[in-house]
Amino acid sequence: MTADKHLQSWQERFEMAEAMQPLLGKLYRNQGVEVVLYGKPLLNASTIEIIKSHRLVRRHVGDKLRLRESFPFVEALSKLAVKQCKVDIGKLAVNYWREHDDASQIEAYMTQELASAIDHEDNQEARDVVLYGFGRIGRLLARLLIERTGVSNKLRLRAIVLRGGRKGDLEKRASLLRRDSVHGPFNGSVEVDEENNAIIANGTYIQVIYANSPDEVDYTRYGINNALVVDNTGIWKDEDGLGLHLRCNGAAKVLLTAPAKGAIKNIVYGVNENDILDEDTIVSAASCTTNAITPVLKAVNDKYGIVNGHVETIHSYTNDQNLIDNYHKADRRGRSAPLNMVITETGAAKAVAKALPVLAGKLTGNAIRVPTPNVSMAIISLNLNGETSKEDMNEYLRNVALCSELQNQVDFTESTEIVSSDLVGSRYAGVVDSQATIADGNRSILYVWYDNEFGYSCQVVGVMQKMLGLNYQSLPVA
């Protein structure tokens, strides 16, 4: 009898999750509403992923959120004229059921909580995006842009620019988008149009353009205008080099997915994106490590004040290293990446000051490359102005992850079993490992995991939206 009870419960949850999926899809594609559950995106989520997302709510609030408790909120949301926003259905449901015993007031409650997005006049025009370079970050950005395909989508991937163009190149590029050894298969279909030199992914027509220099392309030939060019090559990092993109017809702005040199603004989304002005034509999204640590450092500094500290990055190896020993211009990086831990330098600690000037001169940093292909960790050792304890620090950072302005950047885990591979695909800039936190008096050591590829790419998308003036509300506010 007990076995039947568990099976019946599972069946009910499965059917409820299946019923949610078409509603979630229509909300995004017709109204531009992205539904999340305590930060976990439900757009394009599988039935099992929706069920698992509900189970994870216990980690945040201590109690389960059942699908039968959240489904009425998805239904109510689908009936409201809400537009262009992100709605956390988990927070709405949990807050409601804490105060109510039945579902009779859900629609009135939703109308009140989402009032600012109801009948919101959408004056934002869709903008063209070009990916210049199609390596690790370029392909993940493509996945993120393609998953948002729909009438209401405002970031439209129009083209990728590559060097080369030899026979078979187009199919190989498409194959790399279809399959990824780290992040798994592409969620959908990828086709090649050899006659027109294009890739079609889930209905998104992506023109493939071959060029050897940023200033060689006339984007208007392909119907691309006023575009944001996202440079993923890392070859050009200063204003002169990146400025070559702006000589092209059809290009309006440039975003670098690496730390920039000179006076170019380094932006960590969630921390200093408001520094981006309409007149800024070249911006950097900083590095993956800077994005991982800056939100956590901001949160800690806001509450305790940071006197000084050191950041040690345990970083997965990258394409910059050699598979087996060979010449490399940098110290130690010529040694085999899959076989060695390699001490190297990082500018991430100093780069924090570009996004968070209050920490200028207060941090040092170093890095160790390790034999894993993805997911890294930052160990942040801090001397604080105020005193704290492990319990107090963790409680504070847990609240930051749940209900602060940094909730989309900072995640928090209490698992005693989590390891790096569990964080592949994390959409957060950084994940605080609370079990590893050390705090005593005015000293604290924090361990922050981050998917240095996918989590960083999510941050880049945020900067892209800000550069193009595409602003979305996150509701509920608290």
Image (spheres, grey):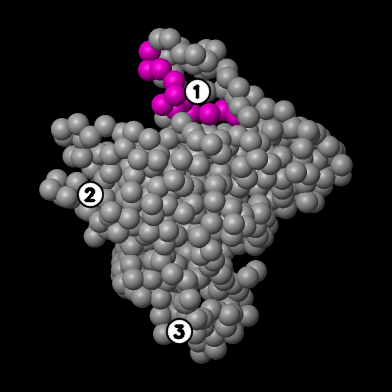
Residue 354 appears left or right of 143: right
Question: Which of disc 3 and disc 1 is earlier in sequence?
Answer: 3
Residue 428 appears left or right of 363: left
Q: Is residue 75 visible?
A: no
Disc nearest the viewer among 3 and 2: 2
- Tell me the residue at 50%/35% (across/down): 241
Mark 1 closeness class: few <14, some 14–19, many ≥20 residues within 10 Å: many
Q: Amino acid at mark 2?
A: Ile
CA separation in Å, label 2 and label 1:
35 Å
- Image height check: is 180 above or below 145? above
- Tell me the residue at 43%/39% (across/down): 232
Instruction: Identify the image quadrant of the N terminus.
Output: bottom left
Q: Helix or strand or loop: what does disc 3 sit on?
A: loop
Residue position for label 1: 370
State the residue lying farthest toward the left. Answer: 195
Closer to the camera in the image, 62 or 440:
440
Measured from the top left, where is residue 261 in percent x and y? 60, 34
Mark 3 closeness class: few <14, some 14–19, many ≥20 residues within 10 Å: some
CA separation in Å, label 1 and label 3:
50 Å
Q: Helix or strand or loop: what does disc 2 sit on?
A: strand
Numbered label attached to residue 199: 2
Q: Which residues are magenta?
A: 313-324
Quadrant for residue 309, please give it: top right
Q: Amino acid at mark 3?
A: Ala
Residue position for label 3: 81
